[in-house]
Amino acid sequence: NRTCSRVRDTLMKEETVTVVRSVGPPLRCVALRACVPIALAGLLLACGVVAAARADRPARQAPWRAGTARVKITPERPVVLLGYGDRTGPYEAVAADIYAKALALEDLAGRQGVLVTADLVGFQAAVVTDEVCRQIAARTGLARSQLLFNASHTHTGPLVSLQPHAQANAVAHATLSGADREATVAYTLRLREQLVQLVCDALQNLQPARLAWGKGEVPFPMNRRLPQDGRIVMADNPAGPVDREVPVLRVEAADGSALAVLFGCACHNTTLTGRDNVIAGDYAGFAQELLESSGTAQTALFLSGCGADANPAPRGSLELARQHGATLAHEVQRVAGGTLTELPGDLVTRLESVELPLQTLTREQIELRTTWPSAEAVMARQMLRVLDQGGTLPTHYCAPLAVWQLGRKLTLVGLPAEPAAEYVARLREAVGDTTLWVAGFNNDCFGYLPTARIVREGGHEAIGVTLWIWGQSLENQVGFFTDGVEEIVAGAVKRLAVRRATEPAP
């Protein structure tokens, strides 16, 4: 293990760049992960890298190694945006560039994990993450459980699809011309390439580091499920459940400089509305920009929380998006500059695929839902289209649930899709641990992840699987979840999190 660690560390030194690059980037990434070829170790020794490794020994006492990377993912030409159905044509301006960023972590035992964040509506497994993870595995050796993809869910981000629908969708995007569809496919393919390289770059930038975490709070998330005339409408509900916590993970380099800060907020990035046909990361993008420009961290990464049923309040303008971003950034600065809980170098990453049951409805029941005054009607009409075309409606959706545990003092739960705020308290109760950081929009954004109460009440957040929006080949991926989904999710998270407690420390 010591030999492997020295090889891995010395690969990161400038003296080895020409040697490693001579065999090509893919091999370099694999060597970083595997650390097994004795011939490579001998080659490094022959090149005089031993001295560099010895000089680095004091710094390597840091409990972690961390690396960051970023890439601008602003489309090179205007494309149609995703998030609102009342826009017309491709975006009209770039209000702010959007980015994908990566934070790679490695513990004392050499276990690695890479967290990727992006200013996008979501990461769909069938469109992006499955293929991206396959390519990353080929280049680095990382297993699927060692990768976590989180989207900020900005509604001023590009449509990502390989087979986009031409027609407008009432809850998603504007009508696409033939040129728009070509531009969307080209953007998606380019995005996948960028994400693969982003992860490799973060791994190549690993350096000794220290991790610590804490949490604060912001006031602007507002529950958006208001009971009215026996139904749930989308409007501010001050009495409704909402998660206003702001988790913060501070990453320091060995010299004490601020390498990165990872922070979260459980609120839709929808300060901008369908009237704003511009590219932007909304409040989360502006918060990251402020944190980086102020020197709080070289790289600021935003991790979406359980904000399916929360909107920023107030909302409706670029000025308000900047205002909420500043509020969030100032709170992150306050928390990051205070006393935090240090995390020992101990990383475990787990991923489990869980079958979430969908309601079995008769045609008459589906037709009744087409009359409801909410997005549930849009979903019901799509279900009828599937049946009319001779298709079969799915009975369940297979969803990825992730649990990362850092230093046995922080458990990061990565829920897929758009989870409601009540999942935070529900999962803390299930696991019996108040140190949970519960994030949403991870790995596969297939629609909404409702609680049992939301399923029973109905409303926009009860629409379930909406994956059909992201491509013509996905048209049968539609359906309403049963109220048993909450218990299944809680049980899976508890199984993944508690299992760690029985394992010996490295």
Image (cartoon, rainbow, N blue to C red):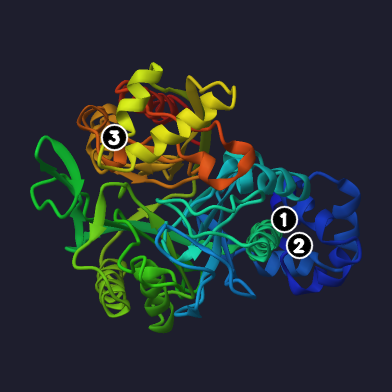
Report x, y in % for residue 350: 52, 34
Foreground pick, 66 / 288: 288
Q: Secondary structure at mark 3?
A: loop
**Separation (CA) of disc 1 from disc 2:** 5 Å
Report x, y in % for residue 110: 62, 46
Foreground pick, 241 / 264: 241
User: Nearer the N terminus, badge 1 or badge 3?
Assistant: 1
Of badges 1 and 3, the one in the foreground is 3
Quarter residue 10 falls in: bottom right
User: Would you say 194 lies left or right of 368 here?
Assistant: right
Image position of 211 with respect to 231: above or below: below
Report x, y in % for residue 383: 46, 30
Of badges 2 and 3, the one in the foreground is 3
Quarter residue 11 falls in: bottom right
Residue drawn 35% across the image and 70% down it = 275
Q: The disc labelled 3 sits on which kind of residue?
A: Thr
Residue at numbered disc 3: 371
Residue at numbered disc 1: 8
Q: The disc labelled 2 sits on which kind of residue?
A: Leu
Q: The disc labelled 1 sits on which kind of residue?
A: Arg
Foreground pick, 117 / 461: 461
Image disc number at residue 11:
2
Q: Secondary structure at mark 2?
A: loop
